[in-house]
Amino acid sequence: MIVVIKSVRKKIEQFCELLKNFTFMVNGTLDFEKAFVTGGGVSIKEIMPKEMQSKLMPGLFFCGEILDINGYTGGYNITCALVTGHTAGENAAQYAKMINQA
């Protein structure tokens, strides 16, 4: 059992490293008329808002533009991204501590 847990943990760590090192090339921007946030994403009905954790998969946290939230332009979307990012990050860290103690 311990070998399986260590194997899973190593795979998660490798995946995290891939995510942290992900890069992409920006080719340019669109004009102002197309510079609005689009709808779609993870439904807020599928998350626990105080933790930003998935109701469907424990240990999976969401924030920012991945959520199906539409706000007016002028700073509301970035505010939402920052607040949900902080909430998801804090709770993901607590969840990771809990898992590591098990």
Image (tube, rainbow, N blue to C red):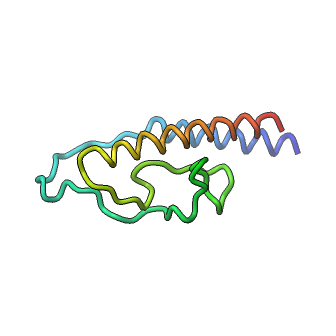
Q: Is residue 83 left or right of residue 34?
A: right
Q: Is residue 23 left or right of residue 84?
A: left
Q: Name the image quarter holding the C terminus.
A: top right
Q: Residue furthest right?
A: 1
Q: Position of residue 31 (x, y in %)?
A: 11, 53
Vertical side of 46 occupied by 95: above or below? above
Vertical side of 45 occupied by 7: above or below? above
Q: Is residue 42 left or right of residue 96?
A: left
Q: Position of residue 49 (x, y in %)?
A: 57, 53
Q: Position of residue 81 (x, y in %)?
A: 41, 45
User: Residue shown at 72%/34% (left/top)?
Assistant: 97
Q: Name the image quarter holding the N terminus.
A: top right
To which quarter of the image does residue 35 belong?
Answer: bottom left
Q: Is residue 14 left or right of residue 66?
A: right
User: Residue shown at 24%/43% (left/top)?
Assistant: 26
Q: Nearer the viewer, residue 99 or 75?
A: 75
To which quarter of the image does residue 11 belong?
Answer: top right
To which quarter of the image does residue 9 belong?
Answer: top right
* Total numbered badges shown on the rendered structure: 0
User: Residue shown at 49%/41% (left/top)?
Assistant: 19
Q: Position of residue 33 (x, y in %)?
A: 13, 58
